[in-house]
Image (tube, grey):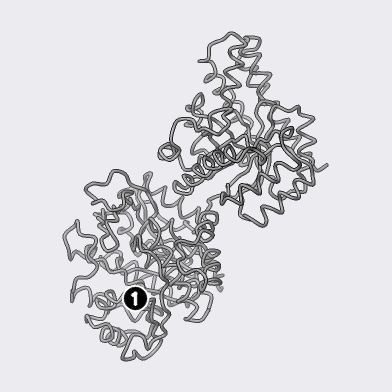
Amino acid sequence: MEIIKKLDLICLGRLAVDLYGEQIGSRLEDMNSFAKYLGGSSANVAYGTARQGLKSSMLARVGNEHMGRFLKEELLRAGVDTSNIITDKERLTALVILGIKNQETFPLIFYRDNCADMALTKEDIKEEYIASSKALAITGTHLSHQNTREAVLTALSMAKNHSLKRILDIDYRPVLWGLTSLGDGETRYVESERVTSDLQEVLHHFDLIVGTEEEFHIAGGNTNTIKALNNIRKYSNAILVCKRGSLGCSVFENTIPEYLDEGITIKGVKVEVLNVLGAGDAFMSGFLRGYLNDETLEKCCQYANACGALVVSRHGCAPAMPSREEIDYYLSRKKKILRPDLDNHLNHLHRVTSRERNWQELFLLAFDHRSQLVEMAIEANTSLNRIEELKKHILKAFIESSQVPNIRGKSGVFIDQTYGQSVLNELTGQDFWIARPVEIPGSRPLRLEHGNIGSQLISWPIEQIVKCLVFYNPDDTYALRIEQEDQIKEVYDACLKSGHEMLLELIVNNDECSVNPYVRSIQRIYNIGIKPDWWKIPPLSTSEWNKIDAIIDDRDPYCRGIVILGLGATKEKLYNGFRRTSASKYVKGFAVGRTIFSEPSKMWFENQIDDNTLIKKIKENYIEMIQLWSNRKQ
């Protein structure tokens, strides 16, 4: 029985955690902090090809610990199949520490002594799984040890039996072949007859072989690239793709010519190099997009060069991988985009097309209120310390409500750190939508709570959305409007840098503003180059929603969406507002607070009801609000 090819590509090889030094220009010895990314050449290619639209899968081992789970979750978020990643209970996940000293110096240390991904055995290779793919890609590192070499050869044999395209990324790292000191992961070439012999023994298995000039030198046993390619051709009829850095690449289908440029040669893309690490994996990802979709070799090279160029201009490997949308946009305008690393729209595409989850509908309970609850406690003549206790009770009501099947996966909160830090800590990591405020309540002009936004975000979990409320009026005096816009821009730029999403909440006083104040305000925010991931605004008229939809369609169709704020309105007023949103494609749900918790909280502060009654009433109000939202189209 013929097995259906449900996968485009299986990547077999290195799967590790990369810890990238964040201080550009520092020695590794002087690094103060590190960013954690998915790493390992095979894993990067699985991730990169998935971002290019291929159905990719990863075949490897990870440790039975936090870092192993992180790698599987990262691959899953990118759309990579992880069903054949084996959890190794006896070994730890591999680790790499890297730095960026300058454009030529990238120190790195491989921590791979008896690591999980090098424990792959031939028994781990399942024929039905191999047969389900169109292609198998392996890296040279897994040919360096007997056990993994047997696993690779087993997989290649199965791949041949089931007509898979077999791909080799030479991926030569001398340290991983035991040719340099353990701490020297940066050296890219050491001559070795043993490595050359080990590689040449397997070259006949492959349909496609990809490497740098130095990698072809080791595989071909000669430091003259043309001679090395000719030597390889004695062992293999594969398509040979030679990566040439900023010069692009050259491809050889048959006889090797006298000069590299006489192959199919596609020139590279000019960018400012930040980090060459991972560029080769990005190149492979782009090339395979074309190769596995039967496009021309010229087109494969265009994808490959563009992918590699974008990654060298960014920090990290896997998170720097461009999406299909980025590459298609660039290639359609490459004559106009002389420096893709500086193109604002291209960078925006990278941000918005790499989001991890698509929220189609949201029921958000907002209890990030600070000044309102302080006033409420003072009116009740009770201690301000009870505000934190109140928020814990609201949290309990929220979590219990969120267990209902039609609510699970759609619920979230707005919660502050001033009185709700313990609530933030408890909810984070539980798959809820979470937004956290940064503004000083009631400030106009906008002022930020807890200091500089950049230093704040260093300690924020990445899943927490930055909520910035601004009392904005497009008819404000020039000085006030510019001051507010500069502050919003500072928050937005910090989010671009940190990777956090941003929600911009607008409140406009209609008595002070001409017609369509929200429409004009949103248009103005886009005009000054700010593209929030989310908007939060009160209920508007149907005609206003139509105009806002048109603006977002034109300025940022990747916008996550809009949530409706309550402003303490009655349930009846909110329901009527919900109904007017029914035709909007960007309104995703509501973000209501005081309408849900205000009256029960006052009674609780005044000791008229106990904890359980408070929780019960908030649950009832929250679920009723969800029902009102769900009935809006009736």
* Residue 143 against residue 433 in the figure, above or below: below
Q: Which residue bears the numbered disc 1? A: 244
Q: Residue furthest left?
A: 181
* Residue 482 against residue 249 in the figure, above or below: above
Kindly identify the amino acid type of the residue bearing the numbered disc 1: Arg
Q: Position of residue 123 (x, y in %)?
A: 36, 62
Residue shown at 19% from the left, 56% from the top: 183
* Residue 518 against residue 198 in the figure, above or below: above
Look at the numbered disc 1 and give the secondary structure of its residue. loop
Relative to 246, 484 lies left or right: right
Relative to 93, 398 lies left or right: right
Residue shown at 48% from the left, 70% from the top: 131
Q: Position of residue 57 (x, y in %)?
A: 47, 62
* Residue 26 against residue 143 in the figure, above or below: above
Residue shown at 48% from the left, 49% from the top: 496
Q: Callout 1: 10 Å neighbours few (<14), some, many (20+)? A: some
Q: Residue furthest right?
A: 634
Quarter where residue 511 is shown: top right
Marker count (numbered) = 1
* Figure quadrant of the C terminus: top right
Relative to 77, 123 lies left or right: left
* Figure quadrant of the N terminus: bottom right
Residue nearer the viewer, 394 or 547: 547
Q: Where is residue 629 in the image (x, y as percent from the top left)?
A: 74, 38
Residue nearer the viewer, 557 or 486: 486
Quarter where residue 156 is shown: bottom left
Residue nearer the viewer, 161 or 623: 623
Relative to 587, 309 lies left or right: left
